[in-house]
Image (spheres, helix red, strand yellow):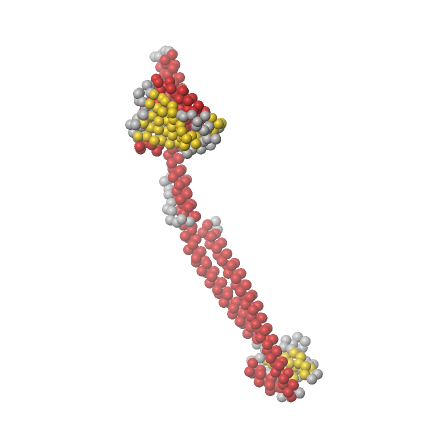
Amino acid sequence: MFSSLRVRLLASLLLVTVVAVGVVAALASQATGTQFRGYVQQRAQKAHFRFQQVFGSYYADRGSWDGVEDWVARMGEMSGDHIVLLDSTGKVIADSAGKLLGREASPNWSGGPLVISNNGLQVGAGYVNPTAGLVDQGFLDSVNRSLLLAAAGAGVMALLLTLVLSRHIVRPLQSLTAAAQRMTQGDLEQRVDVRSKDEIGVLAGAFNTMAESVARNEMLRRRMVSDVAHELRTPLTNVRCYLELLQEGVLAPEPGVLESLKQEADILSRLADDLQEIALSEAGQLRLERQPAVARDICERAATAMRAQAEAKGLHLEMDVPEGLPPVVVDSDRIGQVLRNLLSNALAHTPAGGSIVLSAHRGEEGVEISVADTGEGIPPQSLPYVFERFYRADPSRARATGGSGLGLTISKEIVEAHGGRMRVESELGKGAKFTFGVPTE
């Protein structure tokens, strides 16, 4: 039971309250007792001094203690004190209570003797209040009882307030726990209500964000498994069909058949390489060998590699990269891979007679490089998803050209590994433009 957060919270707050109130009560009791005893002692000292003056004057006026018993009795009645008068030998010569006459005071006599000197004659005067100790202790006991009752009342109030506050704190945590347990059972649609802006509210918001991320990742994982299976199925089916036909003798191992098998094997190889690239980038293990380089040279190599394909398709590929751009600090091979992916994508979606422009200029992120085409463009509803794995605005066409739907995803990961950001602009029927920035020295 003590493992419950509510019980532990209740016990902790109650313990703190009890200790705090107990310490305050003890200090208050000690301070009150000290102050009160000081007051009583001061009062006793004043009474001693007053009685000393009175009895000293009495003896000085009369020269003896004759008749002093009546004075002592009247003063005791008026003051409420028990007054005892001693001579210099410690013998009681007057007692307001009439009980100690003729006795000698012991050495522990609490009221005196107080010695008065008058014409060389040593006399003693003392007093004692036998009820004062009881009255003083009764007052202190009353104060201590009041403090004890106050401490008990504070403890009860602390207990009630702790019960209310602990319920207010623990209830959202219980909701979070229940939602997390249901998520572990496979229900990824669990969310909790955020009702406050305190730490628990922040925790609830973080839980909802995490739940959304988990649900999205699970959806992407399932889709990726499905897409990978689909991508593998097509070339594997083609390879199996060719092999069966070759085995049955329907087809002869002619160069054309072998070339088709090689193309299907190339598709499988590219798919495996692309998946490995994505796995490395997402794990933060994509190796970059950054070196100072000239942006124009990187663009020129990429354009040269793709120019033959552009001419074969009847497309005009031009480069607009001015001289004098600052050197960039990049992995030239990786950035070249990004440019080839973008150019290949533009070639696949631009009809004959169109044009593709590879350009570069100074920008906020250093040097910004763009690939723009005059192709069919990207539908507005597809723009937010073009960089996701296996996404195709036109699945059939992308598969026919051998695309796996991973080129843009890989390009985005490489650019972000360099600290840049990939952007896309498109208008349906008028082409698309992909832009990214690379750092400079």
Q: Position of residue 84 (x, y in %)?
A: 62, 81
Residue found 50% across the figure and 65% down from its top: 148
Residue found 48% across the figure and 31% down from its top: 441
Q: Position of residue 131 (x, y in %)?
A: 57, 76
Residue found 40% across the figure and 17% down from its top: 262
Q: Nearer the viewer, residue 59 or 155?
A: 59
The image shows a total of numbered marks equal to 0
382 versus 256 height, above or below: below
387 versus 305 height, above or below: below
Quarter of the image holding residue 50? bottom right
Q: Is residue 393 visible?
A: no
Quarter of the image holding residue 434? top left
Q: Is residue 201 visible?
A: yes
Q: Nearer the viewer, residue 63 or 242?
A: 63
Q: Position of residue 182 (x, y in %)?
A: 39, 42
Farthest residue, direction front: 324
Farthest residue, direction right: 120
Q: Position of residue 331 (x, y in %)?
A: 47, 27
Q: Nearer the viewer, residue 294 or 419?
A: 294
Residue found 31% across the figure and 32% down from its top: 380
Quarter of the image holding residue 233? top left
154 versus 258 height, above or below: below
Q: Nearer the viewer, residue 304 or 278?
A: 304
